[in-house]
Image (tube, grey):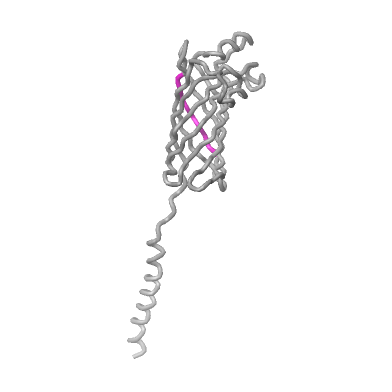
Amino acid sequence: MLNAARPPRVAGVVLLALASAVPAAADPLPAPPADSNVFVLGGPFTSGYFGDAFLLWQDHYETNAFLGVGYQHFLYRHGSFQFGLEAGAGIRLGSPASLELWTGGVARLTRFTFGDLTITPALTAGFSLVTDTIGAETARAARAGEDATVLYYLGPEIAFSSATEPQWEAFARIQHRSGGFGTIAHLDGSNAVTLGLRYKF
């Protein structure tokens, strides 16, 4: 009689364990944070220097413009801080037209949230390669007697996204190239004020 009673008791314990595990297995797992994105950006070049490009209200825009695409992949995340790599390519529209390739490291800080709106400052720093100079950059390179084919790249930006569509992000960025206080060349190359759209995945 004792031996006959054991199987139902053991079966009951097993069924209870399975039943308690079902809700945990059914709970949806949180979506992993997006670690890659693609983006487009474009805007006019300015005739001023890097610091002047932030003075958006000034009438210092050239007829030359920049249009480009890029890709970012993030390798490290700690809280609201992300660090990764960026690569991009663009066309510098003007006389003469030229191509630009750039690559570098990118750091983002997603910390500022106001209701459904998230504001994310970011900075990309690396190197830029162009096939020809353009606008004020041409005049500066000629005055300095410097080759502006390869310069440092700097892309400070501020991005905006909504909690309802977090995969999309609009941003404003300064597309800057320079000699880095003479470490590559003694010139402030080009500065474009751009607007962009990013898709994160």
Q: Residue at x 57, y 46 (%)?
A: 78
Give above or below for 5 relative to 151: below
User: Is residue 46 covered in magenta?
Assistant: no
Give above or below for 197 relative to 14: above
Q: Position of residue 119 (x, y in %)?
A: 53, 41
Give above or below for 108 relative to 41: below
Residue span colored magenta: 83-91
Q: Residue at x 66, y 21 (%)?
A: 181
**How many numbered discs, if any?**
0
Query: Which of 115/191 is in front?
Result: 115
Q: Position of residue 173 (x, y in %)?
A: 53, 29
Farthest residue toward the bottom? 1
Quarter where residue 14 is shown: bottom left
Image side of residue 2 versus residue 75, left or right: left
Quarter where residue 57 is shown: top right
Image side of residue 93 versus residue 1, left or right: right
Q: Position of residue 126 (x, y in %)?
A: 57, 28
The quarter in which the N terminus is drawn is bottom left
Q: Position of residue 23 (x, y in %)?
A: 39, 66
Give above or below for 106 relative to 132: below
Query: Which of 157/75 is in front?
Result: 157
Q: Residue at x 57, y 30 (%)?
A: 125
Quarter where residue 40 is shown: top left
User: Is residue 89 covered in magenta?
Assistant: yes
Query: Which of 63/17 is in front?
Result: 63
The quarter in which the C terminus is drawn is top left
Magenta part mainly helix, strand or loop?
strand
Image side of residue 51 versus residue 17, left or right: right
Q: Residue at x 58, y 10 (%)?
A: 139
